[in-house]
Image (tube, rainbow, N blue to C red):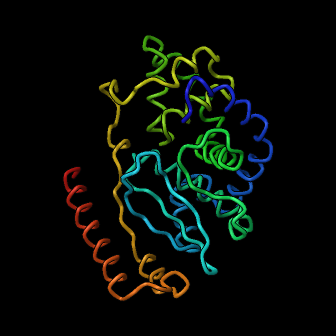
Amino acid sequence: MITKDNLLQVVESNHRLLPGVLSKVEETKETNLLFRYKPVEMIKHYLMQEANVILFPSSFPNYGGMVTYRNHRFYIHINTAQPRVYENFVWVHEYYHFKYEQSKIKNAAIQTFFEDSVLNEHERQANLFAAELLVDGRLLRDLFQQMTHTLRHRPLVDWVLHLIPIFEVPFKVIVIKLLQDGLIQEEEALGLIDYDYQKQLPDDFDHSILQPTLVIKLDDLDEMLKDPAITSGLRESDLASIRNRASTLQQQIREERDRYD
């Protein structure tokens, strides 16, 4: 977890990794116009076409998602129980691993378990890529400059909170990007990074972007359970139990999701 105790180390690491990561961000944007203007939706579409994607809520609060390789197939899981802004970030994070580290994943040289890693270099590169793709630096600077007039009588934390629905990324991603780009001072960033903003949201904040999507996509789970390399040694009763458990969880999640509607 990024806190005031390691924030400056994270930003220092970002500056060191930035040239290589930015080249990949630009390469991604040039691939298709939607990567520039609708990056999350385009990444979802791309990964659905190129890998086996499983969407399922997880009860582990710090778990975002992962990429793994089994029997000549890539499997990507996204935890849809996290707030939508975090899910957006994880989609892009896992895209980076899938797109740029395939050979390492195939050889099991790295693991892509996403749980808000801080200074692990592979995870920091993926986090930085997601932040740079989703938060355009020029737009951020322009918006922040406008806020010196429109929000000049409000605290700095409100400025950050008003940027969340624009970029649809987590609070800490914006704080880090503001410091990294020199728009706020170290002391200001250190004062913001641990702020418990969810308990003190302004009245004009759109709460819906902090709700989980709770999306379920298990068709690739069925494909995975047909793979002999995965199911070898499992009895039919074991497979039936797995499917029944998945079905039960689906129903529970649908009921939970109805509470948000």
Q: Quadrant of residue 29?
A: bottom right
Could you say where residue 206 lies in the image, as x and y percent from the top left?
34, 36
Quadrant of the image occupied by residue 211 = top left
Where residue 201 sits: x, y (%)? 34, 27
Return the residue nearer the eye: 47 or 103.
103
Quarter of the figure that contains the N terminus: top right
Q: Please name the residue shown 33% across and 78% down the image.
A: 243
Q: Residue furthest top?
A: 153
Give left or right: position of 227 versus 252: right
Image location (x, y in percent) of residue 235: 39, 87
Q: Residue at x 51, y 41 (%)?
A: 167
Q: Residue at (47%, 85%) from the top-left corner?
A: 233
Residue sitting at x 48%, y 23%: 159
Q: Is residue 120 left or right of residue 143?
A: right
58 vs 130, nearest the viewer: 58
Work out whether 63 lies above or below 73: above
Q: Which of the two residues, 53 or 123, is positioned nearer the viewer here?
A: 123
Vertical placement of residue 150 versus 235, above or below: above
Count the numbered circles shown. Answer: 0
- Taking the image as shown, residue 29 lies to the left or right of residue 84, namely right
Q: Is 234 above or below relative to 28? A: below
| Residue toward you, 56 or 240 | 240
Q: Position of residue 236 (x, y in %)?
A: 36, 88
